[in-house]
Image (tube, grey):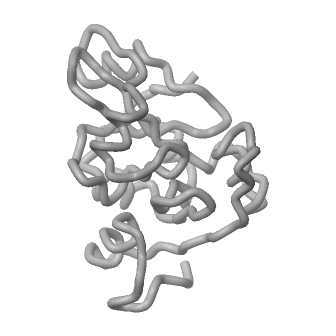
Amino acid sequence: MATKPKKGGRGTPATVALETADVPFTVHAYEHDPAAASYGEEAAEALGVTADRVFKTLVADVDGVLTVGVVPVSGQLDLKALAAAVGGKRAAMADPAAAERSSGYVRGGISPLGQRRALRTVVDESALGHPTVYVSAGRRGLEVELSPAHLVTLTGARTAPIAR
């Protein structure tokens, strides 16, 4: 992967976290359309990659604890599977305002990296089948490409089949 922001350059908390960890990554910017029906599908199309390589970051409430699920934009988060992956019983999508407060990012730009408050995270196991994956870099219209192994390590995630 070729491009990193310059040291000390202006970045998002996600790119700063990647730079600090000194892992290879590439930032991809595209023109975000506020009328887009799906942020993830818009990113895949704009970047010219298949939707199974672009992952969305969703925040759920599992038994009263905010939990991050990272799944391909080509699928949906299976809330029962997410709960099971963290040893919980019930899961529901978190209130968007709570997700934004906890992560420090706005909806549609929530990154699993560099969150204000580190939440337990589960990455769909399909990520491991790709040499690199794309996740939000912390802003609508900005994605970061990195290896799934680095994504899992840097977020402290576990992997499980949480997409359907």
- Asked if residue 69 lies left or right of residue 145, the reply is left
Image quadrant in which you'd find residue 40: top right
**Whole-percent x and y of residue 52?**
65, 43
Extreme residue toward the top, this view: 89
Relative depth, front residue between 94 and 150 = 94
Q: Is residue 76 above or below residue 125?
A: above
- Image: 22 above or below 50: below
Residue placed most toward the observer, 137 or 108: 108
Q: Residue at x 27, y 77 (%)?
A: 20
Position of residue 152 relative to residue 141, above or below, is: above
Residue at 37%, 43% in the rendered image: 100
Residue 105, position as x, y percentages in the image: 40, 52
Quadrant holding the C terminus:
top right
Q: Is residue 82 above or below residue 16?
A: above
Q: Quadrant of the N terminus?
A: bottom right
Number of numbered discs present? 0
Along the viewing direction, whichever of 68 and 145 lies nearer the viewer: 68
Residue 64 in which image quadrant: top left
Foreground residue, 164 or 5?
5
Please tell me which residue is depicted at 63% across the width and 39% down the height of the picture. Answer: 73
Please state the horizontal and vertical placement of residue 124, each as a whole percent of the image: 46, 36
The x, y position of residue 92, in whole percent, is: 39, 16
